[in-house]
Image: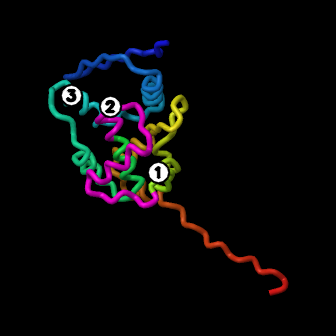
Amino acid sequence: MSETRFQIKLTGPGLNFETDITPEKASHIVQICLGGSSLPSHILDKQVRTEAGKDNLSVVEHFNQYNPRRNPDKILCFASYIIDILGRESFEPEEIKPYFQKCGEPTPKNFSRDFRWAISNGWLDECLDNPGHFYITSSGRKALDSNFPLDVIQKTKVPELRVRQKRRTKNE
């Protein structure tokens, strides 16, 4: 059974792009159009580079463009590489890990916690039609496109853990 496909056409100065897309991509495009959020320039740049026959960015070049500092920031950056540069619709969490080493970064010791942190920031979300696969949300795009400014870092700090207080019994 073939999957329903949608067609998209985008034209502008120096750009004439037409392709078939999946319902998931169509949904994202409609969200961008109706939500008023702007399409990140690096997506358009990728298409222009591809049509001009230039090489895509390496993961290191992509990483250095955004200069992420914290592990969730790095996870979002690598997710962006998979989706925007490699042209994938979604990714699995385990696909992110090798990119740390490729960029000379240590792989997080508690990767699943840091991945959940990126989700709780609202930057990544699980695909409804493909469990176990994730995509970048519009707030993730905004954080990435703004290169993780201080206000984003402050809003997405890891919550402080509360120290459990032992309850005292009447006998103590």
Q: Amino acid at mark 2?
A: Gly
Query: What is the spatial separation of the Cα atoms under label 1 and label 2, in whole angstroms?
Result: 21 Å
Total label count? 3
Quick one: label 1 or label 2, which is nearer the N terminus? 2
Q: In this picture, is 125 found above or below 32?
A: below
Q: Which residue is mark 2?
A: 87
Q: Amino acid at mark 3?
A: Thr
Q: Which residue is mark 1?
A: 115
Left or right of 82 in this view: 118: right
Q: Magenta stretch: residue 127 in it?
A: no
Q: Amino acid at mark 1?
A: Phe
Q: Magenta stretch: residue 100 in it?
A: yes
Quick one: label 3 or label 2, which is nearer the N terminus? 3
Q: Which residues are magenta?
A: 81-110
Q: Which residue is mark 3?
A: 50
Please tell me how crowded label 2 is: few (under 14), some (14-19), or many (20+) other residues with Cα within 10 Å.
Answer: few
